[in-house]
Image: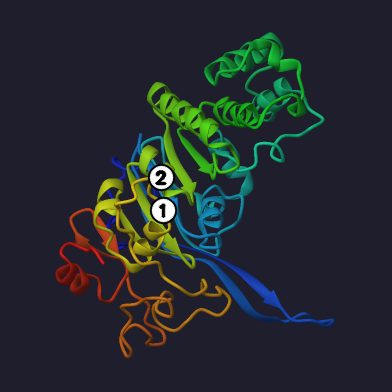
Amino acid sequence: MRPESQPMDPVLSLLSVRRLCKYFPIHGQGLVRRKIGEVRAVNDVSFDVAPGETLGIVGESGSGKTTAARAILRALDPTSGEVLFQSNGKQVDLARLSHREMKPLRQRMQMIFQDPFSSLNPRMTVGDIVGEPLVIHKLASGSELKDRVVDVLSRVGLKPEHRTRYPHAFSGGQRQRIGVARALILKPELVVADEAVSALDVSVQAQVINLLEDLQEELNLTYLFIAHDLSVVRHICNRAAVMYCGRVVELSPIEELFEQPLHPYSHALLAAVPSPDPDVRLRPAVTGETADPARMPAGCSFHPRCPFAKDGLCNVPGRPPALEEVKPGRWAACFRVQELADQKGGGRC
C-alpha cells in the first residue's frame, strides 16, 4: 500500500485501487422521485495487490466488502476513483473503460461467488456451465472445448463424467469446485473469492481452501479473498484490509494484524473469534450497532462504538481519519492510533 500521492510501482502491482467510491442514490416517494440522499457503500478505498499475493478483505456484513469487489471487476460501475490493472506492461484504469473495452480484460479476472448453488444455472450441465466463458469469448469449440473443460474439472478434483450432470446432483463442496473450475477456465491472473467457503461445512472449507492454495501455486494466481471468518483469512492470506462502513480502517500483514492489531475495530473483530484454549483471555468486545452508511456519523464512523474515542477529535464533522502508515507496511485510519500503540505496547488494547 502506498499513499494516493505515491502509487506503487506498476511493475510490482497487479491491481492498484485508488480512492474507490460507490454510492447508491436514495429516491423519495412520489411521481418525481427526487434524490434525497445516498448510501456510501464504498467510500475512498485504496490498496494494492502484488502478483501472486492473497489479500484478504474482512469486516462485518454491510461493511462494503462485496460492493468493493464488484466495483473493481466492473460488475458495478464505480461512482469515482481508479482501478488500475496491469495489462501488457502498463496499468489500465478499469473504471474508465466501456463495457466493450472491458470484455477482453474480463478473461484475466474472474470471480468465485459465495453461494455454490444459486450461482450455477440448474438447467445447464456442468460441462456447459464451466465451458460457457470459452463460448462467450469465442476461445474454443467442439472437441477442444470438451478437452479444456475436462482438464479444468480434473484440476479442481472432479471427474470427467461429471461433465454431463446437473448442479443438483452434487454436494455443496463439489458445487463450489464447479464454481472454481468456471473461474479458472479462462486462465485468469486475478481471482476474487467472495465468501467462497462461508456456505460450506468446516471440513469441506478446509478442502476448498487447500485446493485454492494448490491452484495458486500451480497457476500463479493472485487472490482477492473476501471473508468474515478471520481464522480462514489467517490461514490463506498474506495481508488483510479491514473494512468498516465502506472504508479501509487497517491494512497489515496477516500475522501482525492478529498479534498486534492497531485499529480498535480490528480488536473488535478479533474479540469475536472463539479460541479452543480456555486459558486464553479474550479481548473485550465492542458493543453497539454498525453505523448506517446512509447517515454516517461525523468524523470517524467508528467513534460511536469505540472505547477510545475522544470528544472534539474523533467526532468532528467533515474530518474522517486518513489511512496512514503507522509502522513499516502497516496502515491504520485512527486519530489516536499512535497514542494507543505507545500506551498499550505495540497496539494491544
Which circle marks residue 231 in the picture?
2
Q: Is residue 100 visible?
A: yes
Q: Position of residue 47 (x, y in %)?
A: 37, 54
Which amino acid type is marked by label 1? Val
Q: Position of residue 3 (x, y in %)?
A: 28, 61
Q: From what the image shows, is residue 227 above or below residue 310?
A: above
Circle number at residue 8: none
Quadrant where the C terminus sits is bottom left
Seen as rendered, the residue at the extreme bottom is: 312
Mark 1 or 2, nearer chain start: 2
Q: Is residue 19 visible?
A: no
Amino acid on which disc 2 is placed: Ser
Give the vertical position of 197 relative to 347 (above or below): above
**Secondary structure of residue under mark 1:** loop
Residue 244 sits in which quadrant?
A: bottom left
Residue at image position (79%, 32%) is 122
Per the image, label 2 sits on a secondary structure element best described as helix
Left or right of 303: which side holds 97? right
Residue lying at 35% horizontally and 38% vertically, measured from the top left: 53
Of residues 181 and 27, the one drawn nearer to the viewer in this rendering: 181
Q: Position of residue 91 (x, y in %)?
A: 39, 45
Classed neighbour count for the residue bearing mark 1: other residues with Cα under 10 Å, few (<14), some (14–19), many (≥20):
few
Instruction: Give the quadrant of residue 179.
Output: top right
280 or 164: which is nearer to us?
Answer: 280
What residue lies at 77% left-to-right and 80% top-to-bottom? 33
User: Which residue does the numbered mark 1 point to in the structure image?
Assistant: 273
Real-space Cα separation, disc 1 to disc 2, in angstroms: 8 Å
Q: Does residue 196 sit above or below 269 in this rendering?
A: above
* 189 vs 138, nearest the viewer: 189
Label 2 near label 1: C-beta < 8 Å?
yes
> Mark 1 or mark 2: which is in front?
1
